Image (tube, coloured by chain):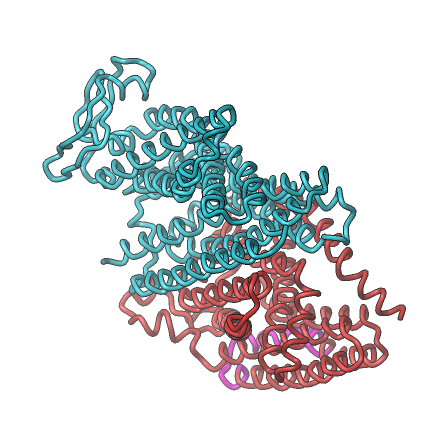
Chain colours: A red, B cyan
Amino acid sequence: MLYVVLFFTLFSFFLYVLLGGADFGAGILELFSSKDHQDSIKKRVYSVMGPVWEANHIWIIILIVILWIAFPGFYNIIIIYLHIPLTLILLGITLRGVAFVFRHYDAVKDKSQLLYDRMFEFSCLVTPIFLGMTYGALISGKIILLENHPNADFASVYIKPWLQPFPILTGFFFSALCVFLSATFLIGEAKEYERRMYIRKAGIATWVVVILGFITLAVAYFEENKFVLDVLKNYYAVGAVVLSALLIVPLWKSIRKGKIVWCRFLAGLQVLLILTAAVGAHFPNLIITESGQISLLDNMAPESTITILGISLIIGGLIILPGLFHLLKSFKMIKILENEEN
Amino acid sequence: MDNLDAARMQMAFTLIFHIVFACIGMVMPFFMVISHYKWLKTRKPVFLKLTKSWQKGVAIFFVTGAVSGTALSFELGLLWPEFMKHAGPIIGMPFSLEGAAFFVEALALGFYLYGWNKLPEKFHWLTGIIVGFSGVASGILVVSANSWMNAPSGFDYINGEFLNIDPLKAFLNPAWFTQALHMTLAAFVATSFAVAGIHAWQIYKNRNRELHLEAFKIAIVFGAVAALLQPLSGDLSAKDIAKRQPVKLAALEAHYETEKGAPLYIGGIVDEENQTVSYKIEIPKALSFLSFGDFNAEVKGLNDFPKEDHPPVAITHYAFQIMVGLGTLLMFSGLLYFISLKKKKWQSSKKYWLYFACLAPVGFLALEAGWIVTEVGRQPWIIHNVMRTKDAVTPMPGMIYSFYLYVILYAILSVAVTWLMIRQIKVLNNSEN
């Protein structure tokens, strides 16, 4: 059953990055667009993501619920030492969610729309940055545990571990990844002029992702970040990153030829490869503190809990996943297939 | 305010906020599908219009509930990491099932909101039903986690360690049934009276009478029935607390001395220092009867428990008085509605509509008071008789700033949602049916 639980942990992590990430990316795209484009993006995003956008953000709840039930010792470190960035993420998630619904369900369309739009766009930009920072902080080896340093001051325990070059760069890298995902997904939904705009933006995002990825790795390398060094030593992980980079070529070919399902698949695969490299190479020691590593499997919940959680997840998955696919199919795929036929 | 109190305040504040949105998100879909059903049956445009405007309300409240729920799922750990570390593996089951139910609700709502003119009519309507039932299911499931804190079970607590964990037994803890029943009914009472009250106000103001009358009729039936059932469920809860948490019972009744044939105190001002309750109304032997079904049964007073195990007595007692008082008022108002079905004249009086409009916030006030009773009444324990709240709190100092942040955020959200609702209703009134 442990494998079932691990599967769902990684599965919800991956889906949140992919689907939640694409949602955040859409808001960032909107922020960095001219006024005319903003309106068209807004409409497009609503028609595409509307039906599933709430579902996209439940994956993070599933993820943290699994973490606290099955891996309480591991979760405990995250929740105590990264309290501040997590609170900022929550602030972002809250403002983003309500802004999305306000701007589409306000009965009167007037100037307040402008406020909702800015609120939506800024929280879309800020939230993935803090998400990336949180992940970066977990693997940067700067977290100091109170039990080892009972007299450490507030800043060095609760602020410095995440306010470092590497976590910050990870944050920016992740938000660039969100834009890349979003632009690539949206290409398939648009036509002619609008489509060319998304292709252009996806192109820029690809470059930003590659450059930021390179800088992040370089900084980690020179800072002698243990996690990254270990990843670089692992042939599978390096292979996955290189393959992900090489996939850019077929991705762009399928974008040019208008093969929408393919380019979505490839973009998703690229992100999966990067995540696999980031998680797989160092599994299960996914937190690195100043004094050592913390394994996901340390202080795991007892067998009985894992068994019941595994069963709950299988039942939940059997109910939810067909529903989710049906929802995607009913609203999204019909449109895509129609577009391809034309 | 020290760190513990700040964390407590933040938790209380977030729950007070979330519970309103969660309840509306649970109950309003039922109004929506009934109006939708009437539209499919009669094809009267007024029902279509009502369905669509309620659907907007559902969407706004669902999302606000969902994001404040996301915040809560983090906050449990952010504020009480020690609690989550030990309780997580024990009460994980209701949380994971609640997550699943909530996911189903989000999916079904996606189908419903975007399904107009795209899905087959009956299937579309059915997705609305699924929204309602999965919402109620997630509410019932998550209450299990709270009732476990009142009735910890499914583990052995030996030398400060939680051993022999049995998540299924924890999930099916003995307080679950009474608490879930009480909460589900409360959600229906509070939401129904709130929605009915808002529409009653519109009728009072003579705006779009046809639509608001239909809306009122749908909402009030749920509220009236639930309000009549609620005292029975309250009686079950009281007997359950008397058995398992006698100190909570003593606090909510403000009884300091153990006595046989204990009287029921109504109202009164609690003086915690001198351990007295003045200006109360006493009903002889009633507390013994209500708690144990026996007029001469012994009811334990607070003084039978160590001082450090006492919850804040005054808050618990006042909150309990408010809950019971307002609940009784709503029960009689439900009765009044059913009588008014016979006495048609009443409904043509403006006072009738003003009365129901004034009741709009009452259900939610009772519901919040009820949560204060159960949460404050459990203090100083986070897990009854096992873990103290002060031992669960985060080691991070400065929680007061986090509290301020949440107060500001949620205050803005409350204002925004209210403002949005007012705009919805205005647009509704200014257009043809």
Determine whether, in the image, residue B318 is placed left or right of residue A13. left
Q: Closest to the observer: A234 or B314?
A: B314
Residue at the spot 39% in from the left edge and 76% down from the top edge: A160
Q: Magenta residues: mostly which secondary structure?
A: helix
Residue at the spot 76% in from the left edge and 77% down from the top edge: A247
Where's residue A210, x and y in %?
A: 65, 83
Where's residue B399, x and y in %?
A: 31, 62
What is the tally of numbered marks visible in this picture? 0
Q: Is residue B114 placed above or below B242 in the rendered structure? A: below
Q: Is residue B168 visible?
A: yes
Is A232 included in the stretch rendered in magenta? yes
Q: Splitting the image into 4 quarters, where does residue B276 fall? A: top left
Where's residue A102, x and y in %?
A: 54, 63
Q: Closest to the observer: B2 or A54?
A: A54
Q: Splitting the image into 4 quarters, where does residue B416 fall? A: bottom left
Furthest residue in direction left, as rendered:
B274
Q: Splitting the image into 4 quarters, where does residue B271 fall? A: top left
Q: Is residue B190 placed above or below B404 in the rendered structure? A: above
Where's residue B376, x and y in %?
A: 30, 42
Determine whether, in the image, residue B389 is placed left or right of residue B313. right
Question: What quarter of the picture does the C terminus of chain A occupy?
Answer: bottom right
Determine whether, in the image, residue B332 is placed left or right of residue A305. left
Is B336 included in the stretch rendered in magenta? no
Residue at the spot 59% in from the left edge and 82% down from the top edge: A32
Q: Closest to the observer: B380 or B238?
A: B238
Q: Which residues are magenta?
A: A220-242
Q: Is residue A127 visible?
A: no
Q: Closest to the observer: B208 or A55?
A: B208
